[in-house]
């Protein structure tokens, strides 16, 4: 059922189905699914009743997925919106570029001097001194609303897909003074109260712990990760214990154990199981809410809620079914959750633990309690990694070598810190006791961080540059599913299929690498947000050269990442190009243009403002002329001095249209890098 639901949602998004196409496919799949559920039709087709029911249910859920995709389709804003009214729903604080980031709910937009009601989420970014914003603050903004753009450079972060999973389709970059706070509040009391509770807990933690340690404990207990040092985050990733920094299933499981220990006595009374289930489920959802209801928390809380309901109804628990049911329920609320990488990792980890922990644990048995605890922790870590490693390789292209050892130490330590954090919040009414607990927690956090940093610095701690595509990912996931069927049925054919799948995935990966190692040489051009980048690529090696404002600069991590993740280049080098400076401006010789050759192509970067016409005895022929500085008049005057085969600019659509209509008398082809930021010559 879950497979059909996800397939329906993906099909709708992949093909951008119209209402008519959606209705047609829904009608066909719905009635064909109902037909397969009918015993007479199943027998007529020669299917077993159970097989027919599975197929029919899958097709019915596929039609449901199509409906979810259609209902979740965002309302498209008219182009050119430059003013709107909105209500702040959450303040994310200051970002890396020193901008304040807030999430807001649109209420009205200004279209042709008329205010029109419109709903939807928008991400705001503005100056820190624009005012104080919290849940319920109403604002009037004079700034353009922009849709998130799909990445135009290989390897670039896909912000559009990232925010899509959160139901956010638009963003606003507001200058100083562009936002006005309106009187009154339109507060979401439920969400606002939850945010205040979380902020209050964070203040208590900051009161009793040093700032850096407090930020760490806030991440462990409350899911507030944005204040952790990026280098420390990288160390946790290299050690394979990033999951301890995110409030996830492990954290919710620990809270569940605490509630079971402290409230288990309720079960002994009449109707105690029902009362216990109601209390525990309510407290779990409250904890999930104050920690921000991240996808991983939603998954965990929903699963534990389903398990509790199974116990109340005295139904045998089927953890995999609970996991799938939780996903189905969550997709009804947010269909885009299936695209969320964090949720995919959480789902994979729980799936691995459910399917593989018991058979792995049966490999070895000991009566020693200490060894038994260590072995159980090892089994959980192995099973979770078995479920998540395909997803990790696909998205992050790396694998932590010492994940077993690091998890054996980091997970118990982080668990103890979570319990200690709960104790600190409970003891905050007693300052002296709170100080002692805070001191102990600070020592524990320093111990955890020191251990993780040590693991991350061991040679070979992180295997990088492992690139697998969607075909390999699908084959590996299929192999894991066959392995699960072998464990469940003990039929050797499933084991053979699992091994065959792994061999097929390895062969496909080897063939892909062979093709990439033998790629012919190509010349590339890249336009980042600031500068132009030239280079070449051969096999899995790239040579890049980046031009700064007045002098050549070294390549930045952004361009190197583009070549690594976009084209799987293992070695990215700086390419030294011999340039010839051209001082074309009579009064500003320091603002030079650069003429250079690369792979037999002459390229002129125009860095001068040419406001006056200058005649040349003979035009200098170049292959490509890049307009880095100046506008139409500068380019028009430059064409009196140079004869390019092609002009490269970074203009918006209107600028390009104006040039073609008024200035481009020579009809030289223009390539606009605002539209196409990366290409091969």
Image (tube, rainbow, N blue to C red):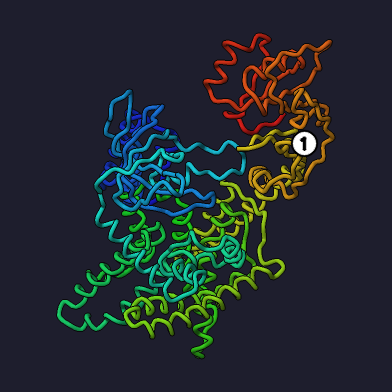
Q: Name the residue under label 1.
A: 520
- In this picture, residue 110 sits left or right of residue 169: left
Give the image location of residue 192, x and y in percent: 29, 57
Taking 5 as reference, is 529 above or below it?
A: above
Give SS at disc 1. loop
Give the image location of residue 27, x and y in percent: 29, 34
- In this picture, residue 95 sits left or right of residue 453: left
Q: How many labels does the image show?
A: 1
Residue at 35% over, 45% down: 104
Which of 478/224 is in front? 224
Q: In which quarter of the image is residue 145?
A: top left
Q: Callout 1: few (<14), some (14-19), or many (20+) C-alpha neighbours within 10 Å? A: few
Which of 182/30 is in front? 182
Residue that extends furthest to the bottom in the rendered view of this protein:
368
Q: Quadrant of residue 300?
A: bottom left
| Viewer can see residue 512 | no
Q: Quadrant of residue 382?
A: bottom right
Residue at 78% over, 11% down: 615
Give the image location of residue 621, x and y in percent: 80, 17
Residue at 50% over, 85% down: 372
| Viewer can see residue 371 | yes
- In this picture, residue 473 sits left or right of residue 121: right
Taking 509 as reference, is 229 above or below it?
A: below
Q: In what quadrant of the picture does the C terminus appear?
A: top right
Taking 472 as reference, is 257 above or below it?
A: below
Give the image location of residue 514, x and y in percent: 73, 46
Residue that extends furthest to the front in the rendered view of this protein:
587
């Amino acid at each position: 059922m879950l497979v059909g639901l996800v397939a329906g949602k993906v099909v709708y998004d992949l093909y951008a189905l119209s209402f008519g196409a959606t209705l047609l496919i829904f009608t066909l799949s719905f009635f064909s699914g109902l037909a397969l559920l009918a015993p007479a039709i199943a027998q007529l087709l020669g299917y077993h009743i159970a097989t027919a029911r599975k197929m029919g249910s899958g097709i019915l859920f596929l039609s449901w997925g199509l409906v979810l995709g259609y209902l979740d389709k965002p309302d498209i804003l008219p182009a050119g919106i430059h003013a709107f009214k909105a209500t702040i729903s959450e303040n994310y604080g200051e970002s890396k570029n020193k901008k304040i980031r807030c999430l807001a709910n649109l209420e009205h937009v200004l279209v042709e001097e008329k205010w029109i009601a419109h709903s939807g989420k928008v991400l705001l970014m503005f100056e820190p001194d624009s005012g104080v914003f919290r849940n319920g603050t109403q604002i009037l903004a004079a700034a353009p609303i922009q849709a998130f753009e799909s990445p135009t450079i290989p390897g670039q972060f896909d912000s559009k897909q990232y925010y899509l999973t959160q139901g956010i389709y638009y963003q606003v970059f507001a200058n100083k003074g562009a936002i006005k706070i309106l009187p009154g509040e339109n507060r979401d009391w439920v969400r606002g109260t939850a945010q205040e509770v979380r902020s209050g807990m964070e203040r208590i933690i900051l009161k009793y712990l040093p700032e850096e340690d407090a930020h760490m404990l806030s991440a462990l207990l409350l899911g507030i990760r944005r204040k952790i040092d990026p280098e420390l985050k990288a160390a946790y990733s290299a050690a394979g214990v990033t999951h301890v920094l995110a409030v996830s299933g492990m954290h919710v499981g620990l809270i569940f154990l605490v509630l079971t220990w402290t409230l288990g006595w309720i079960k002994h009374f009449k109707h105690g199981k029902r009362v216990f289930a109601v209390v525990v489920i309510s407290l779990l959802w409250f904890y999930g809410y104050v920690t921000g209801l991240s996808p991983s928390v939603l998954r965990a809380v929903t699963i534990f809620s389903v398990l509790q309901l199974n116990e109340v109804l005295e139904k045998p628990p089927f953890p995999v079914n609970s996991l799938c049911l939780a996903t189905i329920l969550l997709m009804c609320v947010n269909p885009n959750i299936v695209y969320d990488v964090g949720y995919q990792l959480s789902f994979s980890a729980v799936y691995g633990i459910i399917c593989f922990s018991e058979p792995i644990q049966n490999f070895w048995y000991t009566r020693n309690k200490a060894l038994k605890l260590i072995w159980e922790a090892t089994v959980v870590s192995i099973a979770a990694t078995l479920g998540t490693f395909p997803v990790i390789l696909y998205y992050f292209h790396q694998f932590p070598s010492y994940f077993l050892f690091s998890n054996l130490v980091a997970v118990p330590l982080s668990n103890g810190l979570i319990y200690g954090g709960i104790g600190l919040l409970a003891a905050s009414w007693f300052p002296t006791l709170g100080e002692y607990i805070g001191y102990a927690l600070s020592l524990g956090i320093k111990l955890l961080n020191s251990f993780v940093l040590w693991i991350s610095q061991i040679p070979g701690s992180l295997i990088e540059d492992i690139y697998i595509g969607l075909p390999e990912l699908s084959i590996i996931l299929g192999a894991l599913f066959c392995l699960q069927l072998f464990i469940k049925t003990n039929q050797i054919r499933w084991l053979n299929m699992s091994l065959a799948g792994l061999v097929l995935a390895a062969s496909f990966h080897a063939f892909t690498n062979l093709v990439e190692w033998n790629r012919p040489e190509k010349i590339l051009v890249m336009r980042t947000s600031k500068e132009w980048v030239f280079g070449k690529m051969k096999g899995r090696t790239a040579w890049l050269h980046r031009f700064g404002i007045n002098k050549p600069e070294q390549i930045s991590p952004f361009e190197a990442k583009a070549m690594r993740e976009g084209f799987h280049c293992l070695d990215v080098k700086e390419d030294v190009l011999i340039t010839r400076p051209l001082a074309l401006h009579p009064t500003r010789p320091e603002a030079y243009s650069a003429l250079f050759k690369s792979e037999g192509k002459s390229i002129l970067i125009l860095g001068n403002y040419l406001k006056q016409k200058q005649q040349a005895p003979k035009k200098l022929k170049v292959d490509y002329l890049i307009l880095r500085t100046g506008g139409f008049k500068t380019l028009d005057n430059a064409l009196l001095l140079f004869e390019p085969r092609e002009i490269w600019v970074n203009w918006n659509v209107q600028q390009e249209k104006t040039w073609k209509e008024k200035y481009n008398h020579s009809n030289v082809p223009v390539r606009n890098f605002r539209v196409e930021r990366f290409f091969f010559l």
